Image: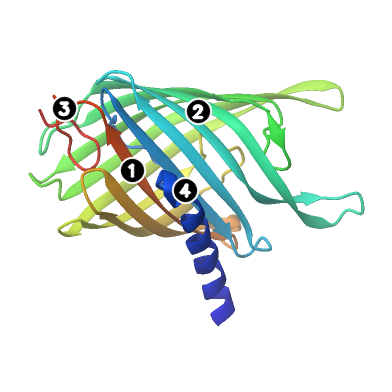
Amino acid sequence: MINIILKPILILIVTTMLTMPQVWAVRPFITDDATLIGRKRIEFANWAYVYPKDKWGWELWHSVNIGATDWFEINVLMCWGQGLEIDAANKIVKKWSYTLPLLQAKFLIRDYEPNRWPGVTIAVGSDLPWGKGPYVARGYGAFAFVSATQCIGKEENVLIHTQVGGAWETYMENNERKHKGGFVLGLGTQVKIYKGFHGIAEIVRGDPYSQNVGPMFQVGIRQFISDKLQVDCAFGSGIGKNSANYMITAGIRYVFSFNKDSNFAPNGRKIN
């Protein structure tokens, strides 16, 4: 039992140390928030998943987010790690894998304000079948979703995020072109507990960055160390027939600002 707990913690510590020179960061939750990082800002966002039930498979995601303007953001992502694959003997084995790039553009429709109307963003992107191993997409994928964030409390005491959209892919199977699509739905929250310490939770169906994600939930904690540095970790599990599958996530994100004319809240929201 001790090994079951210690092993994922050790993996996360090691991967954090390996990536710390560029500042390691996360997208631990699937439900996106309706914010942008802002003009002349660059965010390094990387996150890890560890799957104890799947022979301790793991994956690391890295994202570079560029604030082209205050209303437009570009995201470039990659993933690598050890996934599971069925070999020639019909056995499940670990397989080294990587895939890149996943491209996304995010547009700010309306910024949120405390105790007023929610903020809204629209994101569109594409997953390209380049790389090696089980993490590579079967074909060309595309996704689009709308995110909304409601802020309660002048100090952003409670944030409620919703996400609605779809993901599609086209691929070849047995010399026949096939198409697959599904909804991307999410509901999440962030609750301020004390100063920069927050509790976070979400329930989702589908992931725009990954196909075949069934209903699941995540709960965890988030700490704003400064207005540029954020860390969080969480536990997630499938729901219903997927409840036997669970994962542990963790990470940090860091934002570099080259714009001295604007100030931002810790979560990236422009405040003047």
Foreground disc of the pair 2, 3 = 3
Q: Check disc 1 and give the amino acid type.
A: Tyr
Q: Earlier in the sequence, mark 1 or mark 3?
A: 1
Tell me the element at label 4: strand
Figure check: 89 above or below 119 = below
Q: Please, what secondary structure does the residue beneath circle 3 have?
A: loop
Toward the right, the furthest residue is 89
Check disc 1 and report the residue beneath it: 254
Question: Which is in the foreground here, disc 4 or disc 1?
Answer: 1
State the image coordinates of residue 120 (x, y, percent, origin top left).
27, 27
Residue 260: numbered disc: 3
- How crowded pointer 4 is (Cα within 10 Å; few <14, some 14-19, many 20+) is rated as many
The residue that label 2 is drawn on is 166
**Distance between mark 4 and mark 2 Cα atoms:** 23 Å
Quadrant of the image occupied by residue 98: top right
Q: Amino acid at mark 3?
A: Lys
| Circle 4/circle 2 CB separation < 8 Å | no
Q: Which comes before the other along the chain, label 2 or label 3?
A: 2
Between the residue at mark 4 and the residue at mark 1, the CA separation in whole angstroms equals 12 Å
Counting from the top left corner in percent of width and height, residue 200 is at 31, 54
List the single residue furthest toward the front.
Answer: 21
Residue type at mark 2: give it.
Gly
Q: Is residue 21 above or below residue 41?
A: below
Which residue is at a point 28% across and 18% down the rendered structure image? 69
On the rendered structure, is 11 left or right of 188?
right
